[in-house]
Amino acid sequence: MPQTTNPLAGFCARALTRAVWGFRATLWGFGVTLWGLGVTLGLTVNVIAEPPVAGSSQDSAELSQDSANQGETSKPNDIERPNFIVIFCDNLGYGDVEPFGSTLHRTPNLNRMATEGRKFTHFCVTAGVCTPSRASLMTGCYAQRVGMHLNPRDGHVLRPVSPYGLNPDEITIAEVLRRGGYATTIIGKWHLGDQRAFLPTKQGFDSFFGIPYSDDMTAEVGQRLGERLEGNQWPPLPLLQDERVIEAPVDRNLLTKRYTERAVEFIRKHRDEPFFLYFPQAMPGSTSKPFASEAFRGKSQNGAWGDSIEELDWSTGELLDVLVELELDESTLVIWTSDNGAPLAKDLTSPSRGSNLPLHGRGYTTAEGAFRVPTIAWWPGKIPPGTQCNELATTMDLLPTLAALSGTAIPTERKLDGHDITPLILGEDRAKTPYDDFFYYDRDQLQAVRSGRWKLFLPLAEFNRHPHFKKGQGDQPLLFDVVADIECRHNVAAEHPEVISRLMNSAQQARNELGDRGKPGSAVRQPGKLDAPVALTLR
């Protein structure tokens, strides 16, 4: 049986939620109208200006809309400021959960979340791999802008004992919210630098409980790599409390269970103040056989991958239940998503390493199956229940959106690529995507551009990997209608030369500002770097 912190409390909370939901749904429109009226009438907000950031670059190009979003505040006053929980799964695919089409994995809590909340069907990350994807969520920027897409020592994801990490001069979502009076914590996988200067407690989080990088980056794997990626320096996979290793190696089977218990504890402790819980789950993760606790191991219909998915669903239910129990559900926005699509098995018909169906392609690429991720927003009384958003939004939008909802000033010292998508989250009439263009990079190479329904794969002379081109191909553009042709089967480039011309111009703007292979961008910033990194070990 799935584990639960308090079975009776969980059952009662779920029953109570179902019993009152019809009443909530009836009053939803009235509640949002009153809330919007309060904002219109000018409720007091706590505006906190960001201090100057040392070494801030001069951003001259105007590729990203600097926003009308930046430097503005909106939404509730101090009493109404919502709590925020962002659940960020690792390598979980679009087709891995029931609300997005899985018939293999049992995810009743995500079903509930979607029924009571809002699905996003065109929600994208900025990379097919974890480090750059996480950098974008933290900073509201493309990873290329903040230098977290590639480095000469690690490649496209950070490895243990790396001298590189997210530059402490960057302004993170946690720093914005903490300066706005929020209690902040991260419980789970960080993967933006394992040196003390780059750890979460140096990046705006009050506390950290979790692992510093991917669950497959163990001492055993490092020994097999030897000198490659300096694997012979990798320590046993450490579990950290703040900046201190408390276990090594950590038992990966217990990560989801222990993370969930810590998350529930954090919510209870901070029930009387606004809080931000960043919950980057370690599972299903990067190993061929993900980990799960005894209550879930061997219980799914899809081996280890399914076991981990179903435990993640249980974990989500535990958080929703405690919010209902503490009467925090109507004052808490929960966003559930993934850092990129599933890697998929070598045999694409096998679900043993996840599913991105009906999207095309595997994770770790610029395919839709890598960048478009399952996403659900839940906020009873504010979000219209059982609705779906088909507009393009991204993880870069979380920083400006949560800042706006909290009434905290959005950073103006650093250029952001994200936007305030509050209208999309709240399901406002005629709300549209804020993106004119969205860019798909593989490491330092721009491979595709999306605008509206169109996704253009650019002609390329060479590439490391590509979801459509094979070696020796790539001299002609590919154009897909990713709304009507969700599987990207039909290249319609010949029928739409004007679309290709427009998106090629947009691509050139991106290259100028964010860079492209061998050509540095004009508006990028440097990652953090230390001279003598040390391994995280038990002392």
Image (cartoon, rainbow, N blue to C red):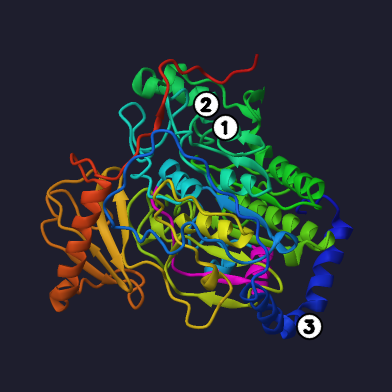
Q: What is the number of the mark on residue 197?
A: 2
Q: Amino acid at mark 1?
A: Lys
Q: Residue 270 placed where, x, y %?
A: 78, 48
Distance (Cα) linking label 1 and label 3: 44 Å
Question: Which tag, 3 or 2, sits closer to the chain's start?
Answer: 3
Question: Which tag, 1 or 2, sits closer to the chain's start?
Answer: 2
* Residue at point 82%, 77% (across, down): 19
Q: For residue 503, what is the image quadrant?
A: bottom left
In the displayed structure image, the side of residue 111 where residue 518 appears, left or right: left
In the displayed structure image, the side of residue 238 where residue 355 appears, left or right: left
Q: Dot 2, how many residues are within 10 Å of its Cα: few (below 14), some (14-19), or many (20+)?
A: some
Distance (Cα) linking label 3 and label 2: 49 Å
* Residue at point 49%, 43% (across, down): 171
Q: Do tag 3 and tag 2 residues touch (Cβ < 8 Å)?
A: no
Question: Which tag, 1 or 3, sits closer to the chain's start?
Answer: 3
Q: What is the number of the mark on residue 111?
A: none
Of residues 447 and 140, the one drawn nearer to the viewer in this rendering = 140
Q: Do tag 1 and tag 2 residues touch (Cβ < 8 Å)?
A: yes
Is residue 108 a member of the stretch shown in magenta?
yes
Give the magenta range. Answer: 107-128
Is residue 146 something that shows in the picture?
Answer: yes
Q: Which residue is mark 1?
A: 202
